Amino acid sequence: MLINKPLAAAIASLLLATGVNAAPRLDTTKVVKREATTPATAGQASAGQRFIVKMTSRSSQGRAALSSSLSSSSRRAGISVGIAATSSSPARPAASAQVLRSMASPGWYVVKTSRKLTASETANFVRELAAEPGVSTVQVDQLYQPLDVGTRAVQPRLVPNDPQYGTMQWNFHDATGGVRAEQAWDKSTGQGVVVAVVDTGVVQNTPDLAANVLPGYDMISDHLVSRRDTDERVAGGWDMGDWVEESYCTQMGAPPHVGRASSWHGTHVSGTIAQQTNNGAGLAGLAHGAKVLPVRVLGSCGGYGSDISDGILWAAGATVEGLPVNPNPAEVINMSLGSSAPQACPQIYQDAINQVNAMGVVVVVAAGNSNADAGTYTMSSCDGVISVGASRVTGGKASYSSWGSRVDLAAPGGGGSVDGDPQGFIFQVINAGATQPTDQFSVGGYTGTSMASPHVAAAAALVQSVAPVPLKWNEMRDLLKRTARPFPAAIPASTPIGVGILDANALVTAATAEPCDPKTEDCTPPAVDLSNKVELRNLTSASGDVTYRFTAVAGKPLTVMTLSGSGNASLYVAAGRVPTSSDFDASSTRATNTETIRIASPKAGTYYIRMTGNFSGLTLVARQ
């Protein structure tokens, strides 16, 4: 994103004039432009090497048994005896292993060796420890990275007066690529809901956001990652920066690398969720009535899976050893992070997700920026999560977005420079510091599925705020998919990014609708308009039966057809009424997903179209 000086100056004056956090200030010369890239792989450990172990015993004897097992497995793995240097390898001192702490997920522990192990030593140690009695699972405690980014229309009541909303936040209001936020705000702003952002934390006192941020927790337990003085976890959840100097991460096992500035990733994500809105300053947030709970798990070089897992559970209100219970448990958790290479969901993540799902928490994750099958990467490879792909201002797939059957729906992530500035980026207020946070702030334009995911997390907060009964995660996923609007641009069948684009208005409308009583009212779903020769793509039966309507003229043949996708669809058409499988003017019910109906001499007026069956990725078009 390119911020010109007049624009930045305007934002600065507006923020300061309104008294929003007058001490921090916007840097009028800050230039920020960040597009999604595939993050580099980080190393595995600092000083020593960390592992996570699950014991079959959940009692106090589990820890004692593990401590005993570490000694014997270290000896069998050959790491407890030093090895002298040779002409081809340096000397390796004897290594020991100890239990660092219990984890929040029952039965799990963090183990650390006294030095970094070689690849062969690691494999031997994992194998021998896994063979110990009472040991269920052993895996390396890996580092993960943030994922870099017939009715009359009614004018919505809330069109925010935030000065940059209209020009920069297409993702909320654009008719083609946006999420229809303004209409949703008439029904809900997320009031009373807590959304945890498990990320790099939030910069304390960020202008236009601070009033909507609750005190969270910094879960990072390695000072090299946190950039704090000790390995202790601390209250707050404030982003201390995630910058790295050149080759800084090599001490954790990474290859040599260039330096980079702090991303302020969690602050940007949090702004999309709950930036203060309609306050005459800065930008808007989708669930601006909700509160953000920052849970810092990512720092320099990424974040350990053990800290991320504990962060998930602490956010939901579970007990974490050595920490106070979270007084503001989250109903929704956003995770814009993941593995930088293909990886199945680690058991520690799955255990944590299962636990918070059982507590009623909805977990939303970014699909990833690798333009690969999201189901082969963490977090989308985990069960119990809602996976979000990234769309552009055109409503098409962002080039970097990961895809596949595991992606549930898409939300704006930005197309980057291909769509230009500002239409190619998602904007929010971020800190202007290169390393540690300063009192200067700027507007940052980012792209990525990291930017798409918080749209859905915020939409979930809109629902939970007004739903008669809070939705469980699978109920939320199904409602999101059922109310998503069809992609207005072609999505290649080989790279699907869900059933459609988030429609916040349709979502909240459906969540607050009273159940229909067919004995006293017409329960037919509202029809979706079809325009002549305009294709509706990526339709799925997961959305339930949907009725479409087409306004025909007399005397010209009308053709209605389905194509592409997979499965078996049936097509029914009727003039002036909604067809059923037993009441229709024409039908096509071949055992395929390709159906065609041709009406040679249609009447002038409305034709209703209904599809049934089990299908996905389908395209529907009417031509006359």
Image (cartoon, rainbow, N blue to C red):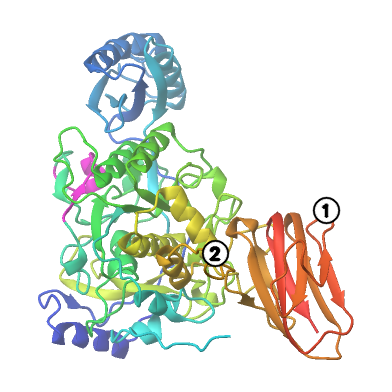
Disc 2 versus disc 1: nearer the observer: 2
Q: Which residue is mark 1?
A: 591
Out of 287 and 401, give the one closest to the viewer.
287
| Mark 1 crowd level (few <14, some 14–19, many ≥20, 10 Å Cα) | few
Q: Position of residue 388 (x, y in %)?
A: 49, 58
Residue sitting at x 29%, y 36%? 46
Looking at the image, residue 505 lies above or below residue 260: below
Q: In this view, which residue lies farthest toward the right?
A: 600
Q: Which residues are magenta?
A: 215-229
Determine which of the numbered discs, if any, sits on residue 519 in the image.
2
Mark 2 near mark 1, Cβ–Cβ under 8 Å?
no
Quarter holding the N terminus is: bottom left
Q: Disc 1 residue type?
A: Ala
Q: Earlier in the sequence, mark 2 or mark 1?
A: 2
Residue 304 in the figure: left or right of residue 402: left
* Residue appearing at x 27%, y 45% in the figure: 316
Query: Can you tell which quarter of the image residue 611 is in?
Result: bottom right
Residue 477 image offset from top left, x and y in percent:
48, 54
Residue 238 is at least partly visible in this image? yes
Q: Position of residue 253 (x, y in %)?
A: 38, 37
Looking at the picture, tell me which residue is in the foreground, 483 or 114.
483
Q: Is residue 390 magenta?
A: no
